[in-house]
Amino acid sequence: MAHLHPFTQHILQWYSVHARSLPWRQTRNPYAIWLSEIILQQTRVSQGEAYWHRFMAQYPTVEHLASASEDQVLLLWQGLGYYSRARNLHAAAKEIAKQGSFPSSFAELKKLKGVGDYTAAAIASIAFNEDVASVDGNVYRVLARYFDVHTPINSTDGKKQFALLAQQMLPKGKAGLFNQALMDFGSMVCTPSSPQCLQCPVQASCQGFHEKNVDVLPVKLKKTTIKTRFLCFLYLRYNGKVAIKKREKGDIWQGLYQFVDAHHLFSADNTQALSPETISKHFPTACVVVQNIKHLLTHRVLYGTLYVAECNEKPLLPEGYLWVNEDKLSAYAFPKLLLTMLEHLHKKA
Ligand code: SF4
């Protein structure tokens, strides 16, 4: 390893002792690796591992995944959040099955739906040993601190600068190993808060540490404004059935199911909470199940409220609602917020 940068040497040495043992690291199967990368995009390893096993058991190959329906895929994904990942995964599986073989280069992988630079580089390097650096949040943080770089990581210049730096550190022929080593190092040693600098194997040459800049790195440009939105759902029971609807394109949770959307039903502004009077005016038997549960999405804060109402007559609802047996609800994929509401409803029953 004499020709390697000292940083690279130390990281590889550290990894040879401390690598996390993860099931997708026991294989070079690109499908299994791709699945793990998509799941881990916005999910912690501890939660994602069970989902990975579930998907591999139900859909052991990309062809199996391609032949599933979107509803089935979303149901298996239920609880992981960021459902566009599941929809893109499914669309990409169909595309791969149509092509007849798994794309085997960074450039080809990037054409898949839901696969950006980072994911394409991770799959290309781990499954196909291509010399490309995968730069995720962990890598930005480690490189910014180690080289004491203050360019914002989410600026155009920053992205270029860090991509170049990561590529320069890459050991040729061992890209997959190094990319995984940096990810583990970033999540186990050079962590976002309270990094383990005193036990760190690269501390002696870490410029950020010596300049006392660890706490201010990496630099990030301010986030976009967060919007607040109120969601009020009605769990309408009629004759043992409940009204649900598949959410449409152009909004959060596309393809998942919801109960009756009260804001939509009453043409109300969803930047404000609906008053109990508005609900009881239309559904006098309605009782509140849970009120203003806070749920965070990337650029939104949601406040969810659920009412339950017994209806003696079938309510007139806008187009698109289905009446399903209450005991069949588990066959439909709901967003996490609605599942939490359902738990409250079951506790009250
Ligand atoms: Fe990160 Fe601290 Fe190690 Fe520098 S010394 S790489 S800041 S853990």
Image: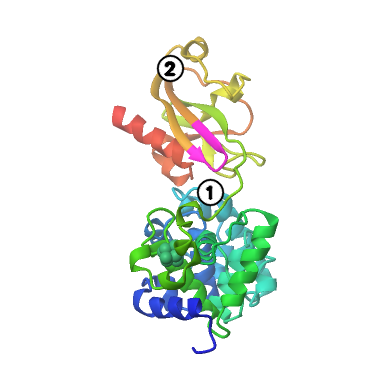
Nearest the eye: 43 or 280: 43
Tell me the element at label 2: loop
How packed mark 1 is, by other alpha carbons closer than 10 Å (few <14, some 14-19, many 20 or more), is many
Mark drawn on residue 129? none
* Residue stretch in magenta: 296-302
Q: Which residue is drawn at 57% across and 78% down?
A: 170
Say whether mark 2 is within 8 Å of ligand 1.
no
Of the four image quadrants, the one with ligand 1 is bottom left
Picture layout, residue 299 above or below residue 180: above
Tell me the element at label 1: loop
Residue 18 sits in quarter: bottom left
Dot 1 or dot 2, earlier in sequence: 1
The three-letter code of the residue at mark 1 reads Tyr
> CA gap, disc 1 to disc 2?
31 Å
Residue 32 x %, y %: 49, 71
Say whether mark 1 is within 8 Å of ligand 1.
no
How packed mark 2 is, by other alpha carbons closer than 10 Å (few <14, some 14-19, many 20 or more), is many
Left or right of 70 in this view: 99: right
Q: Quadrant of the C terminus?
A: top left
How many dots with numbers?
Answer: 2
Residue, disc 1 = 82
The three-letter code of the residue at mark 2 reads Ala
Mark drawn on residue 286? 2
Nearest the eye: 13 or 128: 13
Residue 311 x %, y %: 45, 19
Question: Does residue 185 show up?
Answer: yes
Nearest the eye: 63 or 342: 342
